[in-house]
């Protein structure tokens, strides 16, 4: 293994600024980042489903160590209450998913296995954690790639994404909307700093609705280099905020006309 092996919870609790945190700073303001760090958001059903899909597709052998399926029972009855109480006792801190979610992600896992190219990119070291100190700012950083794979002699950092559509141009909109270029740049920087190996970057995207089609997107060097530049700018901004303990909000003003306010 090239990174550190640990649970997702251990990774989240480890020192270091993450990609998701820095992306808040990049797309909003330092004030938003400070609030997010001090007020962790509750997990939404969509996020739970995505996490479960990641786990089942990338690490099926340890899926039951982190997730457990809730029983179908009527908790308004004595029998149903007893069944559910026993289930809670056996859950032992695992994340609970419904039978419906399990059925859906199982179908997704079966579907992606039919895409031989996708499976080539998803075969490798999964969920390895990388920690490093940024050489310019001395800020501790961390990343946790979904997969490190070697395809046709080239090493890739691979990120599995669920999406609404893999049709031409559709996933590309998500790339722009959710800052995936920034993610590619930060992940490559982190893996390089820890391994001194030069990796390419690829996304394996899968639709969230039947028939759960999937597609591989191999990123150009220019794409990843631009993401690295975005990371460099953002970590410098973060360092300034830390050093000055200044977590400012929006600092610019906008000129709007009467027609914009009606």
Image (cartoon, rainbow, N blue to C red):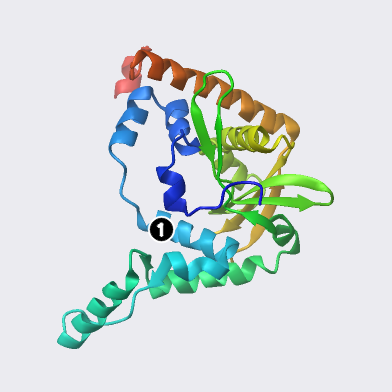
Q: Position of residue 116 (x, y in %)?
A: 75, 64
Give above or below for 260 relative to 16: above
Picture residue at 30% right of the left edge, 22% below the top: 261
Decide which of 80, 18 is in the foreground and name it. 18
Bin the neighbour count of mark 1 within 10 Å (Cα to Cα): few under 14, some 14-19, many 20 and up.
some
Is 58 left, or right, of 83 in this rendering? right
Give above or below for 253 relative to 185: above
Q: Position of residue 48 (x, y in %)?
A: 41, 58
Decide which of 237, 163 is in the foreground and name it. 237
Query: Which quarter of the figure is the C terminus placed in?
Result: top left
Q: Position of residue 136 (x, y in %)?
A: 57, 18
Number of labelled discs? 1
SS category of the residue bearing label 1? helix
Can the viewer see residue 209 in this picture? no
Give above or below for 87 relative to 50: below
Q: Quadrant of residue 241?
A: top left
What residue would you read off at disc 1? 48
Q: Position of residue 135 (x, y in %)?
A: 59, 22
Picture residue at 33% right of the left edge, 79% below the top: 71
Is 42 left, or right, of 113 in this rendering? left
Give above or below for 247 relative to 123: above
Picture residue at 29% right of the left edge, 35% below the top: 38
């Amino acid at each position: 293994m090239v990174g550190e092996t640990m649970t997702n919870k251990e990774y989240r609790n480890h020192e270091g600024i993450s990609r998701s945190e820095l992306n808040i700073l990049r797309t909003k303001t330092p004030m938003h980042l400070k609030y997010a760090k001090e007020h962790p958001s509750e997990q939404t059903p969509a996020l739970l489903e995505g996490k479960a899909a990641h786990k089942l597709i990338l690490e099926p052998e340890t899926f039951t160590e982190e997730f457990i399926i809730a029983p179908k029972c009527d908790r308004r009855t004595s029998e149903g209450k007893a069944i559910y109480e026993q289930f809670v006792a056996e859950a032992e801190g695992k994340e609970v998913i419904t039978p419906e979610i399990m059925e859906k992600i199982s179908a997704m896992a079966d579907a992606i296995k039919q895409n031989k190219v996708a499976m080539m990119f998803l075969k490798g070291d999964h969920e390895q954690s990388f920690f490093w100190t940024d050489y310019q700012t001395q800020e501790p950083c961390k990343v946790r790639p979904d997969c490190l794979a070697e395809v046709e002699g080239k090493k890739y950092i691979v990120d599995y994404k669920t999406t609404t559509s893999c049709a031409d141009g559709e996933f590309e909109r998500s790339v722009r909307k959710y800052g995936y270029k920034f993610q590619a740049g930060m992940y490559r920087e982190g893996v390089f700093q820890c391994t001194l190996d030069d990796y390419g970057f690829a996304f394996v995207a899968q639709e969230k609705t039947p028939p759960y089609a999937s597609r591989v997107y191999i990123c150009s060097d220019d794409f990843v280099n631009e993401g690295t530049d975005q990371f460099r700018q953002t970590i410098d901004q973060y360092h300034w905020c830390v050093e000055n303990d200044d977590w400012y909000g929006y600092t610019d003003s906008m000129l709007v006309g009467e027609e914009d306010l009606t």
